[in-house]
Image: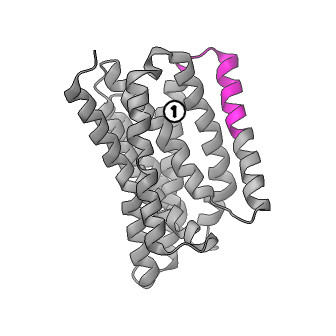
Amino acid sequence: MPSMSELAVVFFLSLLAGAAMPFGAFIAKIDTKNPTILGTEWRHFIVAIGGGALISAIAFVLVPEGSSKLSVLPAALSFALGGGVFCLLDLYLSKAENSMGQLVAMLSDFIPEAIALGTAFATGKSTGFLIAALIVFQNIPEGFNAFEEVSINSTWSHNKIIMVFGLLSLAGPISALIGYNFIWLNQSLMGMIMLFASGGILYLVFEDIAPGSKITNRWMPALGAVFGFVLGLVGHMIIGG
């Protein structure tokens, strides 16, 4: 039987990780009202941090964990399917003139990582706390980036966007508890979910996030991607990978 205290820890950590999304959005709201605080170059730097953090999620959490649970063919098919599905989703959003790639990317790594957090506790691994910390470091810049994109491409007020992000953060506890109670029992399914998400994230990083972070003759955005990846590297090394 699951321990109630452990369930509470899983719920709290995943909720905290999800809360980083509206927190990042709140920072973006302040920047929108006072654009001189950051300036264009620093804003693109933060966008690139989100891209680097997403790639680190693929490299250090999703692909290693997912590929360890599958043979070569199912792993490759799951990854390729993720890229293909996200490509079709991107085409649909483009035709609908409703580009929200940052928001999709944010949720597509948050949900499987929250599942991984839950399964870590269910299988007795000591990595759950640090997976939660890694998600927080990713979700703050991703929440910032997604807020700016949604505010440009929708008629929602800033407060409504933050409220929606707050509601979306509840996907963390839901996913973590599903991982804790059910998905850890089916390791192949867990692997397919992680690799599917990895393929989709990689597509979105190169299609949407990386091009959007670039400024001609400026070096800071590229360093932002490096910094975002370093955050993932540090978390991975602390975990003991």
Q: Quadrant of the N terminus?
A: top left
Identified by mark 1, the residue type is: Leu
Q: Residues within 10 Å of mark 1 (few under 14, many from 20)?
A: many
Q: Quadrant of the C terminus?
A: top left
The answer to whether residue 202 is left or right of residue 63 is: right
Q: Of residues 83 and 72, which is closer to you in this image?
A: 83
73 drawn magenta: yes
User: What colouring method underlies this structural image?
Assistant: one colour
Number of numbered labels in the structure image: 1
Residue range of the region highlighted in magenta in the rendering: 67-83
168 drawn magenta: no
Q: Of residues 7 and 57, which is closer to you in this image?
A: 7
Q: Main secondary structure of the magenta part?
A: helix
Q: What residue is pinned by disc 1?
A: 62
Residue 129 in sight in this render: yes
Secondary structure at badge 1 equals helix
Asked if 91 appears above or below 35 in the picture, the reply is: above
**Residue at 43 percent of width and 74 percent of height:** 29
Residue 60 in sight in this render: no
The answer to whether residue 235 is left or right of residue 84 is: left
Q: From the top left corner, tell me how far across and down residue 168 is, in percent.
A: 46, 52
**Residue at 57 percent of width and 57 percent of height:** 102
**Residue at 47 percent of width and 43 percent of height:** 110
**Residue at 43 percent of width and 72 percent of height:** 159
